[in-house]
Image: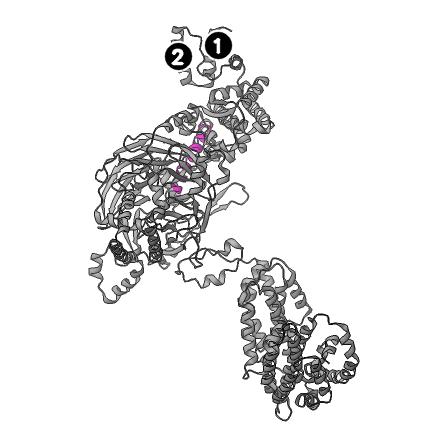
């Protein structure tokens, strides 16, 4: 029952050379030994408390023995708490691992460094009751959410070297293996079926949170290093996508690290070093990725979207940037929603197209690749603006049917030819991007085709036969038709002035008019290719 | 039954149970009684008026005395109690614990060691939650001699436990004991429990702690002591009082105000020492001051202080130099008003590279000096004002090789950033700065207290008087006098100019772990391992209050600035707020997970700060805790549980000491511990 048994006493007696200890003595000694031990421990605990510690050390026991006028036990002093080991095969037997040391080794070993001297450092724990977020204070997140990726911040701590950081990040063996496997798949075999499985796992598995800081670091690292490797970049973006999908991951704190690499993939000058690399597709994918990030975290990071749009707009408006960058920027903005397009792209559309135009012409741009790029950008622009105008028109309140009916026949007659042509245009436009992926061979043919076909609607845009019909028809329904004809003559600036003028017009018609103008100006810029984006009933309204 | 027979039976019973003292006392008394031929014969069962009980005891003495009876009797009583009516259950449960420990001690006393062990282990779980530490102590009792030797067990045997119980519960218990003929239990209960039967409804559960605590001295004594009169008011002619008068004068004349501002800026320069940190708060202070000057009548602090009664000092108090007085007045005038809405700024001093050897720390009143007591017998003092420049000067020394002269002039080594005080021959357990910061006292395991001068950097006096390690030493609020507490179970009052103690306060049943002066210097409070806090009159050396309620050793004490309340923190992390005049606990404050090393009231008494081994500083709102329950007469003050305002976690740094500067900036200190 008791801790110290009769047998223990006997064993101890034997160990100090008393062989013939009578059983009675052992029996009497056992309880007393236990009592004395408890007494000493009680005193030792007091000493521990007064040393303001919560862990008992050998020093405490020595002081307690001193208090009882007992010789302290020498040879057990240690700076910290003792490490006990469990004896193999015994449940309640512990011992201190005491290694044999060779005197020679000890003597020959270089002198250990002198321990650093005690010092006092001062910091603000709180200022008027609020804890400042400085490295000396416990991170507030520790309490708020058990986020474990503090290691990056801690590295930057300006603390003296001798302070060991208290939070050590420990990854389990399984997670390490998992991480290595994913990395391997991403880097080397991103086209395998296994990688697809891995992406699914990343998007669904719980318990991956400890790995998030490593993934973000890995992604940003690889993107900055491997801009030439198209497959790798695409794989990385897919990993980001999957991580974003995972409901168990709290990725928000790492966004600031992820975003630069993602945006890089969107608007980088060159992605991949071979022509066969379909970087357009990657840019499209990344644009969607960016948009989804904005949608999810826009409310948390207030400046996320503004910063992003600023970056993209900057890339879009800088004429020195390459076509690929423009394309990425346009796609990115388009993915952020039609409003973005209307606010940021459309006002700049006119001057931009003027710049773009020569790039698209065979005569002026001899480099096929460049020309192709220009056409891609043109397609992207068309898609973006078309989508925005479609969205805009869709929002219109249901119009009274009679006027629509009145114009229906007329509209049909008028619109059918452009529709066909549009289909053609559209087709041709989509084609290069699609075809180019497959082969570079037909490149020769397609651009020439395009330039010959597309040129008329663009250059002579305002002139074609359908146009005069349309112009009057729409202006007949709208009040400021003068401005439209004006704008036709004076193009860009007049156009915007017309917009302003129309904005001054009656409030009730404002929205309607604006989009009417928008449509018209778009039509001027793109020709009929914009038309298929306009829903039929609304279209009829303007015809 | 014949009188004679009963007496014989009683004597036989006492002999059997080994109560020699009681037996002797009984026989003595018996002789007296024989002379007087009075009827009243049974002194050991004075509380029982029931003749039936006497009968039971008689039959008990005749019957065989088997350990199994205890076991059986207790387990029956236990199961009965647990199945009793809910309303009365908690009252009856209180009876179980004293019965349990006394059954155990009875068994030990009779030599049934093994059976006692069995008994103890089979029921200890019931009481572990409430009385874990007591049980751990009792567990070690293995022979009758231990019972005599161990202070705790001895005092338990000597005294009776008081249990408040309502009429009906009492009847229920008696009924049960009679019906089941469990004489053993009845015996134990009669011997060791004193029931205070109160009519009416059972008391609420919340009173539990107070009722069940087993202390050496009886509750009656404590109550009696707590009846004594104490004067908790502030000192007459204190600086605060003078400030109020001076404040009136000052605001009258603009010129004086201007002067104040000048001195203020000087003060600022002096104080930029504190890491330039108080600077910011001083700005605030200035604003505050302007506000205060404009509408000084509205100052809550002034009102609160003036409310407190004034008392005359019992000691001859030291006279303060006028320039020091001026600077303190200055500080008081510039104090930030703290409240639950305006929390203090906390400056934290972290000791690094202590290698687990820092035992205590102390901060001077202005926060410019920090002392650390180490287990290697050294005391180190850092001057925080030099902290910033220190690295620069050391580089300078290296370059220009001015070292020789510097070192001679310098403290005790060129490179050190601190002043090293060596002299103790055992771990330093406590250090305290004099109010003016020119002296430090340190206490050590070598049972001495040493006085050091921070100006001369030398040991001035060694005070020998304690026989065992001195756990704590504290300067009085006005300096000159100091109090110490020791493992020898005494607290002592000293003055700086005498090497012998002026008073010895004896009465605690275990180590006196901490000591604190009352704000008016007429009392000291001591916290002990016997789980009580006592208040002593400095002049007479008498114990004037016993505060019972802690469940583990008391580690820290703090007195409110109005002298009315006291806070004490214990090993479990509980803080208790006491009303000095009534001797009752106003409110227990739960929240800390581990030992509360340090407590401090803000200067106007609206906030309490506590520092703990769980690496947090907590701020508590005192105003809600103290004022409201008082009006409610301490009855179920759950509605206004003392609010924890803020928890400030540190980076794995247990908080060793706290100090509010006179301007209400809170300083905290602790050693960074790697193992956490």
Residue A151 as seen in the image, left or right of residue B510: right
Please tell me whether mark 2 sits on a helix, a strand or a loop. helix
Residue A228 at x, y percent in the picture? 58, 78
Residue that lies at the very extreme toward the bottom in this rendered image: A363
Q: Chain of mark 2?
A: B
Residue B442 as seen in the image, left or right of residue A295: left
Could you say which is closer to the camera, residue A519 or residue A252?
A519
Both on one chain, marks 2 and 1?
yes
Please tell me whether mark 1 sits on a helix, a strand or a loop. helix
* Number of residues whose C-alpha sits closer than 10 Å to that of mark 1, classed few (under 14), some (14–19) or many (20 or more): some
Could you say which is closer to the camera, residue B333 or residue B106?
B333
Residue at the (63%, 69%) spot, across then down:
A238
**Are circles 2 and 1 on residues that touch, CB within 8 Å?**
no
Q: Which mark is residue B29?
A: 2
Residue identified by numbered label 1: B6
Residue B285 at x, y percent in the picture? 34, 54
Q: Is residue B295 above or below residue A450?
A: above
Q: Is residue A40 magenta?
A: yes
Q: Chain of mark 1?
A: B
Numbered range of the magenta stretch: A27-49
Residue A230 as seen in the image, left or right of residue B406: right
Q: Is residue B35 above or below residue A316?
A: above
Q: Is residue B621 above or below residue B468?
A: below
Q: Earlier in the sequence, mark 2 or mark 1?
A: 1
Q: Quadrant of the C terminus of chain A?
A: bottom right
The part of the image, by quadrant, that contains residue B461 is top left
Residue B80 at x, y percent in the picture? 59, 25
**Magenta: predominant secondary structure element?**
helix
């Amino acid at each position: 029952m008791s801790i110290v048994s009769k047998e223990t006493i006997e064993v101890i007696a034997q160990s100090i050379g008393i062989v013939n200890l009578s059983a009675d003595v052992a029996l009497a000694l056992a309880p007393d030994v236990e009592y004395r031990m408890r007494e000493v421990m009680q005193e030792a605990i007091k000493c521990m408390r007064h040393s303001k510690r919560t862990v008992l050390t050998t020093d405490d026991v020595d002081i307690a023995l001193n208090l009882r006028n007992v010789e302290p036990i020498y040879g057990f002093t240690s700076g910290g708490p003792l490490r006990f080991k469990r004896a193999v095969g015994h449940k309640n037997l512990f011992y201190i691992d005491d290694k044999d040391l060779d005197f020679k080794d000890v003597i020959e070993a270089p002198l250990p460094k002198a321990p650093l001297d005690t010092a006092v450092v001062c910091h603000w724990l709180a200022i008027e009751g609020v804890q400042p977020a400085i490295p000396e204070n416990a991170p507030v997140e520790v309490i708020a959410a058990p986020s474990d990726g503090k290691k990056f911040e801690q590295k930057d701590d300006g603390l003296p070297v001798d302070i060991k950081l208290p939070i050590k990040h420990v990854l389990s063996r399984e997670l390490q293996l998992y991480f290595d496997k994913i990395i391997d798949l991403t880097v080397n075999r991103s086209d395998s079926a296994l990688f697809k499985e891995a992406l699914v796992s990343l998007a669904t598995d719980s318990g991956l949170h400890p790995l998030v800081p490593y993934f973000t670091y890995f992604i940003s690292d690889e993107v900055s290093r491997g801009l030439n490797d198209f497959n790798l970049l695409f794989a990385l973006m897919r990993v980001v996508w999957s991580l974003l999908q995972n409901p168990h991951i709290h990725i928000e704190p790492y966004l600031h690290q992820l975003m630069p690499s993602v945006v890089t993939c969107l608007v980088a000058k060159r992605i991949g070093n071979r022509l066969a690399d379909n970087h357009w597709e990657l840019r499209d994918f990344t644009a969607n990725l960016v948009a989804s990030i904005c949608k999810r975290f826009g409310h948390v990071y207030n400046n996320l979207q503004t910063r992003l749009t600023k970056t993209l707009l900057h890339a879009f408006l800088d004429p020195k940037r390459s076509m690929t960058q423009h394309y990425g920027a346009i796609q990115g903005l388009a993915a952020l929603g039609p409003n973005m397009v209307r606010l940021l792209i459309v006002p700049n559309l006119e001057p931009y197209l003027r710049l773009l135009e020569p790039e698209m012409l065979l005569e002026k741009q001899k480099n096929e690749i460049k020309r192709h790029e220009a056409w891609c950008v043109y397609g992207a622009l068309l898609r973006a603006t078309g989508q925005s105008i479609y969205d805009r028109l869709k929002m219109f309140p249901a119009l009274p049917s009679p006027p629509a009916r009145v114009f229906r026949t007329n509209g049909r007659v008028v619109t059918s030819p452009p529709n066909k042509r549009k289909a053609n245009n559209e087709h041709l436009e989509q084609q290069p991007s699609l075809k180019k992926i497959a082969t570079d061979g037909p490149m020769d043919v397609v651009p020439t085709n395009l330039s010959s076909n597309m040129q008329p609607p663009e250059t002579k845009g305002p002139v074609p036969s359908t146009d005069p019909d349309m112009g009057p028809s729409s202006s007949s329904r709208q009040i400021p038709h003068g401005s439209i004809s004006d704008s036709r003559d004076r193009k860009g600036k007049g156009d915007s002035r017309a917009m302003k003028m129309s904005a001054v017009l009656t409030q009730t018609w404002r929205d309607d008019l604006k989009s009417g103008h928008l449509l018209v100006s778009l039509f001027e810029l793109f020709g009929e290719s914009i038309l298929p984006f306009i829903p039929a009933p609304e279209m009829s309204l303007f015809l | 039954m014949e009188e004679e027979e009963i007496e014989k039976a009683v004597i036989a019973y006492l002999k059997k149970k080994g109560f020699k003292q009681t037996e002797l006392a009984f026989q003595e008394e018996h002789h007296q009684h024989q002379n007087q031929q009075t009827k009243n014969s049974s002194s050991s069962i004075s509380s029982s008026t029931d003749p039936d009980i006497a009968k039971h005891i008689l039959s008990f003495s005749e019957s065989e005395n088997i350990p199994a009876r205890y076991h059986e009797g207790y387990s029956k009583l236990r199961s009965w109690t647990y199945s009793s009516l809910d309303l009365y259950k908690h009252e009856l449960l209180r009876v179980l614990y004293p019965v349990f420990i006394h059954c155990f001690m009875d068994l030990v006393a009779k030599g049934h060691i093994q059976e006692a062990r069995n008994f103890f282990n089979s029921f200890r779980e019931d009481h572990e939650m409430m009385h874990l530490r007591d049980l751990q102590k009792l567990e070690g009792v293995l022979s009758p001699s231990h019972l005599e030797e161990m202070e705790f067990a001895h005092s338990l045997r000597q005294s009776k436990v008081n249990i408040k119980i309502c009429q009906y519960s009492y009847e229920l218990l008696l009924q049960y004991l009679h019906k089941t003929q469990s004489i053993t239990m009845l015996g134990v209960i009669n011997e060791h429990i004193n029931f205070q039967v109160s009519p009416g409804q059972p008391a609420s559960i919340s009173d539990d702690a107070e009722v069940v605590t087993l202390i050496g001295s009886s509750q009656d004594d404590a109550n009696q002591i707590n009846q004594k009169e104490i004067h908790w008011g502030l000192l007459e002619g204190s600086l605060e009082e003078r400030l109020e008068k001076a404040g009136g004068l000052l605001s009258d004349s603009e010129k004086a105000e201007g002067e104040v501002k000048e001195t203020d800026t000087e003060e600022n320069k002096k104080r930029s020492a504190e890491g330039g940190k108080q600077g910011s708060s001083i700005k605030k202070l200035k604003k505050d001051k302007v506000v205060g000057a404009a509408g000084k009548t509205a100052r809550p602090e002034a009102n609160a202080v003036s409310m407190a009664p004034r008392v005359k000092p019992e000691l001859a108090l030291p006279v303060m130099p006028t320039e020091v007085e001026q600077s303190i007045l200055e500080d008081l005038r510039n104090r930030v008003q703290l409240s639950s809405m305006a929390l203090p700024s906390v400056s934290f001093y972290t000791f690094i590279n202590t290698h687990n050897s820092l035992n205590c720390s102390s901060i001077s009143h202005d926060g410019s000096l920090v002392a650390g007591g180490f287990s290697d017998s050294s005391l180190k003092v850092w001057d925080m004002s030099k902290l910033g420049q220190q690295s620069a000067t050391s580089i300078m020394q290296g370059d220009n090789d001015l070292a020789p002269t510097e070192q001679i002039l310098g403290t005790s080594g060129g490179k050190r950033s601190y002043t090293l005080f060596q002299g103790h021959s055992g771990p330093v357990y406590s250090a305290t700065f004099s109010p003016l910061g020119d002296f430090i006292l340190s206490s050590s395991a070598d049972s001495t207290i040493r006085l050091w001068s921070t100006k001369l950097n030398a040991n001035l006096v060694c005070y020998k008087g304690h026989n065992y390690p001195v756990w704590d030493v504290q300067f009085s609020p006005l300096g000159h006098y100091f109090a110490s507490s020791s493992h020898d179970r005494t607290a002592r009052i000293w003055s700086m100019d005498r090497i012998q103690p002026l008073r010895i306060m004896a009465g605690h049943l275990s180590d006196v772990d901490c000591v604190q002066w009352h704000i008016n210097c007429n009392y000291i409070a001591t916290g002990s391992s016997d789980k009580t806090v006592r208040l002593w009159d400095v002049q007479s050396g008498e114990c004037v209050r016993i505060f019972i309620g802690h469940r583990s050793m008391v580690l820290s004490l703090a007195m409110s600035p109005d002298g009315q309340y006291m806070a004490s923190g214990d090993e479990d992390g509980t803080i208790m707020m006491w009303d000095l005049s009534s001797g009752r606990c106003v409110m227990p404050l739960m929240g800390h997970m581990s030992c509360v090393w340090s407590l401090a009231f803000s200067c106007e008494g609206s906030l309490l700060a506590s520092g703990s081994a769980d690496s947090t500083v907590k701020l508590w709102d005192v105003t809600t805790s103290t004022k409201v329950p008082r009006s409610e007469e301490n009855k179920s003050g759950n509605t206004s549980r003392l609010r924890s305002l803020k928890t400030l976690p540190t980076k794995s740094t247990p908080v060793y000491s706290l100090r509010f500067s006179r301007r209400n900036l809170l300083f905290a200190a602790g050693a960074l511990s790697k193992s956490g």
